[in-house]
Image: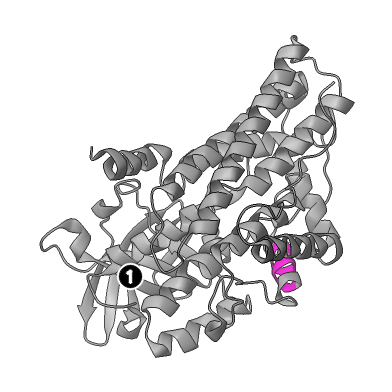
Amino acid sequence: MIQQNPLKAPSVPATNGSRSARANENEFRQQVRAYCEQELPPHVREKVRGNLFLSKDDNLEFLKSLAGRGWVAGHWPKAYGGAEWTPLQRFIFEEESMLGGAPWLIPFGVNYVGPVIYTFGSSAQKSRFLPPILASQEWWAQGYSEPNAGSDLAGLKTRAIRCGDHYVVTGQKVWTSYAQWADWMFCLVRTSDESRPQQGISFLLIDMHTPGITVRPIRTMDGCHHVNEVFLDEVKVPVENMVGEEGSGWSYAKFLLSNERILSSETGRSMRQLNHLKTLVNSTPSDGVQDRAAFDRRIVQMELKLHALRAFCLAYARAMNPSQPPGVEASIMKIRGSELQQEIAEATLDWLGSSAIVYDPVQVHGQHAASHVGPASTSGAVREYLHGRASTIYGGSNEIQRNIISKAELGL
């Protein structure tokens, strides 16, 4: 029988480095655990643990529960309403909250455009956009990828032409996550064809209620509405919505993407999913696994990979200088974290066997885990597997991450 003890981030012994630093680390970890147990809305926690689809209202309730502790944007500077977390505190929050049943904190406002605005934006932009992000009053989408510009983002064609006090934007974005909920979209647009393609890209903030914008849903293979196509037909955008300098958008985009990959290991999510698999193995017979000993070894191997990934992430977070851009470590974390998530999801479906053949998306849009066949968590496990196929693609595909590593470390 596989070990039943759930995976749990251990307390850090005060033997290496500063004892006070380790004590503070453990204290903060306990604070996040207490939040998850006492303040995280129970119905949200139940849906997350069941891998069910969360509505916008579910996400709003989660954010409201964070607001009481000032944790909606804990990594922001205090001057803009944050708690000025260190990289280590940010990692601990992400890990412990996901392990404790909190959802993915939809990052487009808090983690992506917010830091771009307070780092590169004007005073007027900071005053206009940062408070509504912090208060969860305005939701954002990310207008990066296009039909012919995904991994090759420099090939984007959406154009913004300056006409007096506004730009006229025409083009198409695709795979735009949660654009159906968004009030605003931060968008990479082409403002020039001169010189290198990257030098003609600018960073524009677009009101999603502006005439000329059409959002068309894309149903992913889990049967849920996560992503969209966004069409922009001569959309008028005020010049003051340009962040920084015209033509410098590529630099801002790289800043945003490097910050995105810091959080992409999602070790807390992997720990939660592996705990779920271990519970299944100990409580539910399998008609999909014939060699139990080999499957137990498979679980142990995944657990070892997860411990190694956590050790790497923690070492990096402790040493990281927040004033410097992340190095190739961020790409390594993205690769290893996303591949491990997929391994755990595949193993879960292998254990469920024939129960996982039947999948109805209706079952993952309810309030409680339910399934036509097999354990109640079956439909959620299938959704996790299907949706998780995208994790090695979004945020910069793993092939691109390997190119980044080879170029930086090997000069290739």
Q: Which of the pair 191/154 is nearer the observer?
A: 154
- Work out whether 371 lies above or below 72: above
Point out residue 82 in the picture as x, y percentages from the top left corner: 59, 78
Q: Is residue 217 left or right of residue 301?
A: left
Point out residue 289 in the picture as x, y percentages from the top left corner: 74, 14
| Colouring scheme applied when the structure was drawn | one colour
Task: Residue 9: tell me if it is visible.
Answer: yes
Point out residue 294 in the picture as x, y percentages from the top left corner: 70, 13
Question: The residue under label 1 is which amino acid type?
Answer: Phe
Residue furthest to the left in view is: 195
Q: Which of the pair 351/115 is nearer the observer?
A: 115
Q: Residue at x 86, y 19 (%)?
A: 285
Which element type, helix, strand or loop, lies under badge 1?
strand
Q: Residue at x 10, y 61 (%)?
A: 195
Quickly name the residue at label 1.
203
| Quarter of the figure with the N terminus | top right
Q: Which residues are magenta?
A: 58-64
- Work out whether 106 lies above or below 208: above
